[in-house]
Amino acid sequence: MPSHHRARAHSDSSSRIRVVEEETEDPDIAKKSRIMVFKSMMSSTKLFVLVLLCMQNTMFTVLRRYSQGVLKEVYSKYEVLLVGELIKFVYSAYKIASELSQGEKAIPKLRYLLKRSTKMAVLACIYGAMNILSFVALRNISAGMFTVFAQLKILTTATCSSVMLNRSYSMTKWRALISLMMGVLLFSEPIWNRDDNSKNPEGGNVALGTAAVLIEVTLSGFASIYFEKVIKTDPEQLGIWERNYQLAFGSIPIYVMFMISEDGGVAGYFGGWSVVAGILALLGAAGGMLVALSIKHGDSILKTLATTGAIVLSATLDHYVLGGPLTNIMCIAGVIVVISICNYTFDMSPPEAPLQTEPKTDKPDEEVALTKASVRY
């Protein structure tokens, strides 16, 4: 290979792959470039975080099934989510304070982050709107219809990624995502194919319920990509702990409103709590942090793959530990899901260039310097 090609090939990983594939027809070099793509996708940190997220989702699902399906505990789910957000808020504040450089003070820093938490507050409001839309949908359509439409989250996430982040996915990846969606849909067959779940609620408005669930799955995809865009391209480039701190702060009042709206649930405010409920709150807090880490080190699609894989794993554990259903159709669908995840993950198409941080244009240099000084002192 000529020397000017070698110089360009070593500039960065993404440009190296493109130069090699576009400017040479050597099959050995093309093979090496594909190996480099595979290694970049399977970096130890990214893989570790995604495996942890999959395990967290699995444990949360199985434990919640044990709590409410076996133990018949009647605590409010919004209280569990609220406690999880409080744990995340406190722990993130602790991590921020412990990582301050010499001379910085914790209180001004935390106060500054709260003042700059508008973007995360928007995300918290989207999550709240999704909860309300799910409630409206289930009041007007059957649980089976809701489950079928919910699988569209996979495609809405990929579509929003293409539109909002200008990403392009190979046909292999699109086929993998579509087969993944169909596999998950088939895996959930015991839910949507039951007689009692196929009947719409009496007096329900099917058009309203369908519109609500379609808006909910669209918001789900938008929220995932919005979160990724803020983490990776925001000019402030705040860390994971800062973003979790801001998101928890915005989520707490929303869950408080949900608690008040259902008047504390069947058991009343903070009634019916147990050790299992406390563990669920801890797992919920850990899940929020792992989602942010998975997006930071990977992307929203890989996060979706991890949570989808957890559906199969949790259902398998539910069958062997709690006696849940595991039909032949579910086994075939589980294989389809695993193959689809592998097809997406091991696709050797050149990776997209990393997202670039947006330049700061809203503040002059002097104002930025004053802001940093106020945080430090």
Image (cartoon, rainbow, N blue to C red):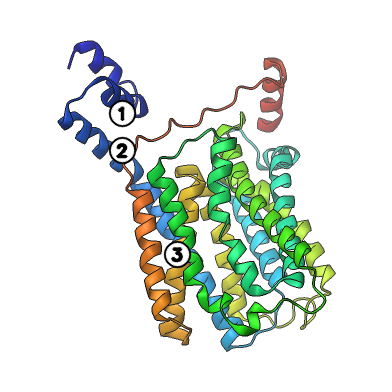
**Image-based side of 262 in relation to 251, left or right:** right
The tally of labels here is 3
Q: Is the residue under label 3 in contact with that under label 1 (CB below 8 Å)?
A: no
* Foreground label between 2 and 3: 3
Q: Residue at x 69, y 44 (%)?
A: 120
Of mark 2 and mark 1, the one earlier in the sequence is: 1
Residue plotted at (42% across, 78% down): 317
Q: Residues within 10 Å of mark 2 (few under 14, many from 20)?
A: many
Q: Is residue 109 shown above or below 325?
A: above
2 or 159: nearer the viewer: 159
Query: Which numbered marker is on residue 323?
Result: none
Q: Is residue 324 left or right of residue 30?
A: right
Which residue carries the number 1 mark?
17
The spot of residue 135 in percent (x, y) is 74, 67
Helix, strand or loop for disc 1:
helix
The kind of residue on which mark 3 rests is Gly
* Amino acid type for the residue under numbered disc 2: Val
Name the residue that disc number 2 marks: 37
- Disc 2/disc 1 C-alpha distance (Å): 8 Å
Residue that appears at 60% across and 22% down: 359
Numbered mark located on residue 183 in the image:
3
